[in-house]
Amino acid sequence: MGGLGDQITDARTAGTPGQPVEVPLAGAELFVDPTGAAVDQVTSWVAAGRTGDADRLRRISEQPTAVWVTSSTTAVRADVDAVLTRADAAGGMPVLVAYHIPDRDCGSFSGGGASDGDDYRAWVREFAAGIAGRPVTVIVEPDAVAHSLDSCGADSADERLALLTDAVAVLKQTGSAQVYLDAGHARWVADLPKLADALRRAGIGQADGFVLNVSNFIGTQENVGYGRRLSDELDGRTRFVVDTSRNGAGPVDGATVDGGPSWCNPPGRSLGESPTTTTGLDRVDALLWIKRPGESDGDCRPGEPPAGQWWPEYALQLVDQAE
């Protein structure tokens, strides 16, 4: 396969044998994972004769999407290695989401994570060991910085931001990881100087940039404008990426819909722009599908699956709204 695979081969041939190679995200070919719930669902529906539904779902299964890494400290190295091994075989830049900070999601629908700071520092080092010098893009801890500024995370903000600084540094020391630190979304933190300060304390100076709109529905144009203002607040050069996986119809107005939070599995949403690393947008390295379309945001209403669980009916809704 051409593209990034050739770039990696050429760089490794030209460099010192055994040394890690850093391949920027912008302009890279993205890895399409041949495994996963959407791929399995397509196979299952074809076997069952549901070829129409299978064809609709291929709009998700054939796109490059991020792989969320939430494994335990003992398992994370092998899990990272497994994804990067698949990417080596298929070609393309893999995108991983490191999601294991203590008190993850402030104990809400996606709660969990490391037991304490020591466990998290060990986890990050095992994650980095799984990279083993191979090119990868890592999205660091969705919501963690923004939560450090609200009521749920303010008491532990110093420790959390220090853990994030350590994580960014360890991942960059691999020499082959492009690292983007999560910065929430365009409608979360209105005080940009305050958010910029938190990002500095979380290690943005060592990262390749920040990321916006992970698992949210806010339109690309709004996020890009917000991201440029945040970049200006930092230094005017900091780059960023945007999650467009489900933002084609924008967010739901209001705080709730059908008795649940408006950010959680809202009806009537749509797939957004396809993933690309050639955006033509100032300071925007990529539009990515970071949240896997069709995975639940949480059991926010009766009958909805837990966070991260595959939900084929919702996946088809996202596809159909994108028609």
Image (cartoon, rainbow, N blue to C red):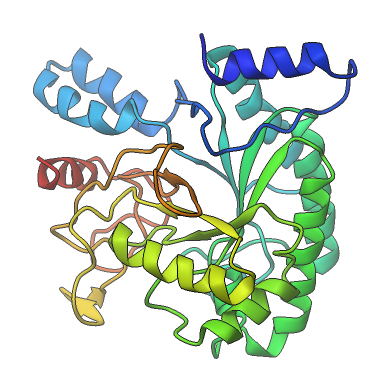
Res. 185 in view: no
Quarter in which the C terminus is drawn: top left
Quadrant of the image occupied by residue 168: bottom right
Residue 8 drawn at (x, y percent): 67, 19
Lateral position of residue 220 relative to residue 288, left or right: left
Residue 127 drawn at (x, y percent): 75, 43
Residue 144 drawn at (x, y percent): 60, 70
Measuring 39% from the left and 44% from the top, which residue is drawn there? 280
**Residue 27 to residue 165: above or below:** above
Measuring 9% from the left and 23% from the top, which residue is drawn there? 52
Measuring 26% from the left and 73% from the top, which residue is drawn there? 262
- Is residue 192 or residue 218 the one in the foreground? 192
- Is residue 217 or residue 124 the one in the foreground? 217
Lateral position of residue 159 relative to residue 227, left or right: right
Measuring 78% from the left and 41% from the top, which residue is drawn there? 128
- Is residue 33 or residue 52 the one in the foreground? 33
Quadrant of the image occupied by residue 273: top left
Lateral position of residue 130 relative to residue 319, left or right: right
Res. 134 in view: yes
**Residue 103 to residue 275: above or below:** below
Residue 98 drawn at (x, y percent): 63, 51
**Residue 252 to residue 173: above or below:** below
Quadrant of the image occupied by residue 60: top left
How many labels sit on residues?
0
**Residue 204 to residue 292: above or below:** below
- Is residue 157 or residue 286 the one in the foreground? 286
